[in-house]
Image (tube, rainbow, N blue to C red):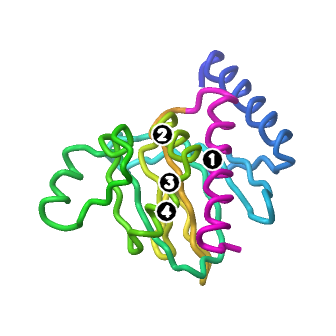
Amino acid sequence: MSIIESLFKKSQRTIWEEFSNQQNGILKSESGDLFVEYEYSNFILKVKNYNYNVAGSGYSDSYMVGMAEFLNPSQLEFQITKDDWFTSIIKIFKNKEIKVGNNDFDKRFYIKSNRELKTKNILKDKLLLEKIISLNPTRIEITHTEESFGETPSNGKYMLYCAKQEKFKDLAQLNEIHSLLVLFIENLKVNCQIQ
């Protein structure tokens, strides 16, 4: 590792430490990727830098990910992804697309859900919708079965994942992910009675 890389890693750690202090969290490391785990409104939230590497190929992607685990009596599951050529193919062969009635959002994102009306109701929250549009995440998902970004929901629980394909930059980036998680948690407490 060069001196410049070493200094950059140290400055990254300082930013993560500051975020951890802001949230009264714990800074941890997993395979060299840093993350902060903290409590918000009786929920454990995690914001992490996740590097996805395909063994033997040299291919890797960096994601900034926020996640929260909870009990979900409504059993709502959904996935919001960027609308691209891949989702266009899926729409042709598989799932009905859910629209929320916001042109900017509906042009950018593809939604699938097991509870269409509940999903639309959640996304009526103007602040939440604006935050999603401004953050422009790669994927937002609520699931109870799938492993994503190195995490699997505990037995009987659901996990909210908010991920954006990008490298770690700064404290503002961590705070944006945190604010999106908080908006989702508050909305899901009301609309899905999550615990």
Residue 160, horizontal then vertical, whole percent: 56, 62
Residue 67, horizontal then vertical, whole percent: 61, 56
For residue 102, what is the image quadrant? top left
> Which residue does the numbered mark 2 point to in the structure image?
62
Q: Residue furthest left?
A: 92
> Which residue does the numbered mark 4 point to in the structure image?
121
Spatial CA distance of label 2 from label 3 is: 30 Å
Within 10 Å of disc 3 (Cα), the crowding (few <14, some 14-19, many 20+) is: some
**Element at badge 4?**
helix
Spatial CA distance of label 4 from label 3 is: 5 Å
The residues colored magenta run 168-195
Whether the magenta-drawn stretch holds residue 184 is answered as: yes
Residue 101, horizontal then vertical, whole percent: 36, 49
Q: Which secondary structure is most common in the magenta stretch?
A: helix
Residue 128, horizontal then vertical, whole percent: 56, 47
Q: Earlier in the sequence, mark 4 or mark 2?
A: 2
Within 10 Å of disc 2 (Cα), the crowding (few <14, some 14-19, many 20+) is: some
Spatial CA distance of label 4 from label 2 is: 32 Å
**Element at badge 2?**
strand
Whether the magenta-drawn stretch holds residue 61 is answered as: no
Camera-side mark, 3 or 1: 3
